[in-house]
Image (spheres, grey):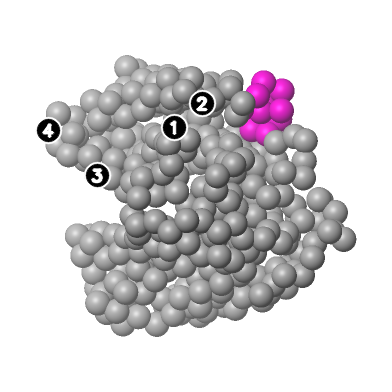
């Protein structure tokens, strides 16, 4: 399936086609996120009910990571990417027609599962395209994802403003994603699958990938903490006006997006390991700055540093993991993602527990330690990486 040779395509053409799928992933996810408030109103869900229902999506993502690894060891990442993109689009279109919270739970579980297939295979494709270049290009792919997120959020704003229903909006985006996926798939790179020995469904990453997994855990924990708590931190700790509470999140997102577009140039000049160490320091210093000096300007500067810090760590770790000599790039990415997403899911709730027991500043101070852990873990990466 989809074994069309790609030797007649230039690296630039393959890179462009892969970039399209990063864009589709970003705009599709942001489209869903932009309509969550509308869905909450339509289904008459309170905050607690909505929070519990939304948890179905990351659960679907996490439990299907082993399946994704198995599929990527049997089929080309291009095939898995098309399947994932198509399923993601179809399920996105179904979301708007849910009429109860109970219907939403299995649909969101499937959305998370399909998004997992889509994202890991798209990154596996990026790793394959990266091998065609003698300079780093991985961070740019993730920058395109971030830009697509802004585009999806903007489209969501206008859809709500002009009265486009949630069902119509999600269905139109679903059709757009499917058309683009089938339109650009032939331009992507074909990777012959690398069969892997049979393993238990849930296993720890191979020893050579454990350091990468832990770095991903620390970075993704910091990243999702900023997603979930940056606005609350500005409101309750910095005590800005309630209408300005999103300032922290906005400056963080802008910095993260810019960081992904300049990250490759930094890597090409200073090397991946130096960039990773610098990124960990930025996370630590940025968070501590906002903790020690809880003033609007300094906290915003700290959040900017955190945005730059987290921007390129995961794409660079994916790039290193893709060089594994014992696993295919896709299987290696699936393996380290299983640990990374645990940080993404488990650490932000812990921030709330610590904030309740002590305060939110103490939570952010403890999370800053993860930045230092990244610095120390980088020293454990083998020199040939």
Which one is earlier in the sequence, the residue at label 3 or at label 4? 3
For label 3, the residue is 349
Question: Where's residue 113, x and y in %?
Answer: 42, 65
Which one is earlier in the sequence, the residue at label 1 or at label 4? 1
What label does residue 357 carry, if any? 4
- Marks 2/1 in contact by CB < 8 Å: the verdict is yes
CA–CA distance in space, label 2 to label 4: 36 Å
Q: What stretch is highlighted in magenta?
A: 263-272
- Marks 3/4 in contact by CB < 8 Å: the verdict is no
218 w.r.t. 8: above or below: above
Q: Quadrant of residue 265?
A: top right
Which one is earlier in the sequence, the residue at label 2 or at label 4? 4
What label does residue 211 carry, if any? 1
Helix or strand or loop: what does disc 1 sit on?
helix
CA–CA distance in space, label 2 to label 1: 7 Å
CA–CA distance in space, label 1 to label 4: 31 Å
Which one is earlier in the sequence, the residue at label 1 or at label 3? 1
Residue drawn at the location 46% of the way across and 75% of the way down: 91
CA–CA distance in space, label 3 to label 2: 30 Å
Decide if residue 153 is in sight here: no
What label does residue 381 carry, if any? 2
Question: Where's residue 167, x and y in %?
Answer: 45, 79
Decide if residue 266 is in sight here: yes
Magenta stretch: residue 185 in it?
no
Q: Which of 365 and 313 is in front in this view?
A: 313
CA–CA distance in space, label 1 to label 3: 24 Å
CA–CA distance in space, label 3 to label 4: 13 Å
| Foreground label between 3 and 4 | 3
């Amino acid at each position: 399936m989809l074994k069309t040779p790609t030797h007649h395509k230039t690296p630039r053409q393959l890179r462009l086609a892969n970039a399209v799928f990063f864009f589709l992933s970003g705009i599709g996810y942001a489209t869903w996120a932009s309509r969550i408030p509308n869905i909450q109103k339509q289904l008459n869900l309170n905050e607690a009910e909505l929070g519990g229902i939304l948890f179905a999506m990351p659960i679907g993502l996490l439990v299907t990571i082993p399946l994704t690894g198995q599929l990527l060891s049997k089929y080309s990442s291009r095939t898995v990417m098309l399947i994932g993109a198509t399923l993601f689009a179809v399920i996105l279109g179904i979301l708007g027609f849910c009429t109860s919270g109970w219907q939403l739970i299995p649909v969101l579980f499937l959305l998370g599962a399909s998004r997992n297939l889509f994202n890991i295979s798209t990154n596996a494709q990026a790793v394959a395209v990266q091998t065609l270049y003698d300079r780093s290009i991985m961070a740019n792919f993730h920058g395109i994802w971030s830009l697509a997120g802004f585009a999806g959020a903007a489209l969501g704003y206008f859809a709500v403003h002009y009265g486009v229903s949630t069902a119509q909006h999600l269905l139109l985006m679903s059709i757009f994603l499917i058309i683009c996926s089938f339109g650009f798939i032939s331009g992507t790179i074909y990777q012959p699958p690398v069969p892997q020995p049979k393993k238990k469904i849930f296993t720890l990453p191979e020893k050579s990938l454990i350091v990468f997994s832990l770095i991903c855990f620390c970075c993704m924990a910091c990243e999702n903490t900023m997603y979930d708590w940056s606005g609350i931190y500005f409101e309750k700790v910095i005590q800005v006006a309630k209408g300005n509470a999103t300032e922290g999140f906005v400056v963080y997102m802008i910095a993260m997006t810019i960081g992904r577009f300049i990250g490759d140039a930094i890597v090409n000049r200073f090397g991946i390991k130096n960039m990773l160490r610098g990124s960990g320091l930025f996370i630590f210093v940025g968070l501590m700055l906002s903790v020690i000096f809880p003033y609007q300007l300094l906290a915003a500067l700290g959040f900017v540093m955190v945005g730059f810090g987290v921007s390129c760590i995961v794409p660079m770790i994916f790039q290193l993991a893709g060089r594994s000599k014992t696993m295919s790039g896709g299987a290696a990415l699936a393996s380290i993602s299983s640990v990374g997403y645990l940080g993404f899911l488990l650490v932000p709730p812990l921030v709330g527990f610590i904030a309740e027991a002590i305060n939110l500043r103490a939570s952010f101070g403890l999370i800053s330690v993860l930045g230092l852990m990244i610095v120390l873990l980088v020293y454990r990466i083998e020199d040939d990486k």
